[in-house]
């Protein structure tokens, strides 16, 4: 019984540190509404972009949760799964941007002032992923970047800067394409917005509950939790 309070206190932080699902569903709603190339509007990808992103969130959550069970014996595989949980939905959400920036040329390719912002956003997003996966620069000089210059600090800085350019680009798309999208894009409905969001929320809660139940009855539960948090001396807590 003494283990149960520890489990309740730590399970969310130690095992399911996965904000990516919420972030990428939000991006899918935004890109589906404002960033989709003109020639793709009302097409297959446009109509099913948000529901597919919701399904991707289940994959993202499952990979992130399952990776914690591998952390003790297969640390590299665990890190690979957590990276995939970030990379896979990111690549899917940015399909409209990749097409607009790299493959689409002509009058109906939506080449406007937002393009520069999207370029900068993708650059900082790639840099964010690189810092997350490489653990540079602390790998080159262990102990010298513990307080300033650690990769996790740089990770968040790049993420914030990238988000700034992303919002600026969406702002330009919103204002420059408002009239055209109002005339050609399908009207948002309850089924395509709140219903999808609710299904994604319910599905992810069920996934987390399932993995939590498995962890609670696992013989390695204490070791899995301890692998995510350093032990604290009880005298120091007092």
Image (cartoon, rainbow, N blue to C red):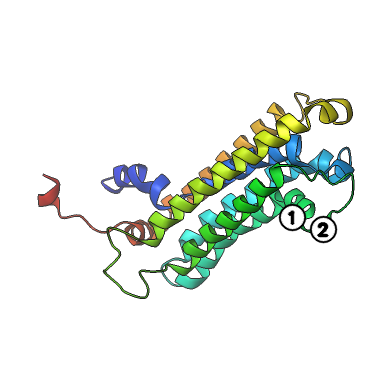
Q: Nearer the viewer, residue 92 or 156?
A: 156
Q: Which quarter of the figure is the N terminus placed in? A: top left
Residue drawn at x 40%, y 61% is 151
In the figure, residue 221 lies in which quadrant? bottom left
Neighbour class for label 1 at 10 Å: few (<14), some, many (≥20)?
some
Q: Nearer the viewer, residue 3 or 116?
A: 116
Choose the circle earlier in sequence order: 2 or 1: 1
Q: Is residue 55 above or below residue 147?
A: above
Neighbour class for label 2 at 10 Å: few (<14), some, many (≥20)?
few
Q: Position of residue 153 (x, y in %)?
A: 38, 55
Q: Position of residue 10 (x, y in %)?
A: 35, 47
What residue is disc 1 on? 98
> Mark 2 and mark 1: span between their CA atoms?
7 Å
Residue drawn at x 79%, y 54% is 99
- Does residue 220 appear left or right of residue 183 in this picture? left
Furthest-bottom residue in view? Answer: 140
Q: Is residue 180 above or below residue 26?
A: above
Q: Which quarter of the figure is the C terminus placed in? A: top left
What residue is disc 2 on? 103
In the figure, residue 201 lies in which quadrant? top right
């Amino acid at each position: 019984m003494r283990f149960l309070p520890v489990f309740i206190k730590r399970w969310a932080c130690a095992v399911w540190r996965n904000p990516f699902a919420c972030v990428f569903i939000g991006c899918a709603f935004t890109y589906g509404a404002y960033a989709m190339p003109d020639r793709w509007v009302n097409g297959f990808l446009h109509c099913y972009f948000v529901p597919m992103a919701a399904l991707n969130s289940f994959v993202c959550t499952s990979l992130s949760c399952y990776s914690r069970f591998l952390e003790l014996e297969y640390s590299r595989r665990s890190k690979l799964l957590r990276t995939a949980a970030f990379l896979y939905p990111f690549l899917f959400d940015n399909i409209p941007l990749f097409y607009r920036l790299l493959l689409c040329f002509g009058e109906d390719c939506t080449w406007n002032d937002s393009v520069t912002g999207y370029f900068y956003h993708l650059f900082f997003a790639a840099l964010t992923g690189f810092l997350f996966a490489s653990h540079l620069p602390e790998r080159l000089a262990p102990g010298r970047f513990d307080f300033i210059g650690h990769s996790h600090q740089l990770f968040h800085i790049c993420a914030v800067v990238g988000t700034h350019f992303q919002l600026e680009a969406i702002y330009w798309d919103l204002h420059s394409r408002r009239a055209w999208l109002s005339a050609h894009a399908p009207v948002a409905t309850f089924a395509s917005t709140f219903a999808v969001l609710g299904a994604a929320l319910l599905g992810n809660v069920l996934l987390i509950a399932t993995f939590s139940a498995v962890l609670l009855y696992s013989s390695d539960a204490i070791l899995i939790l301890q692998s995510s948090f350093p032990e604290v001396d009880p005298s120091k807590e007092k």
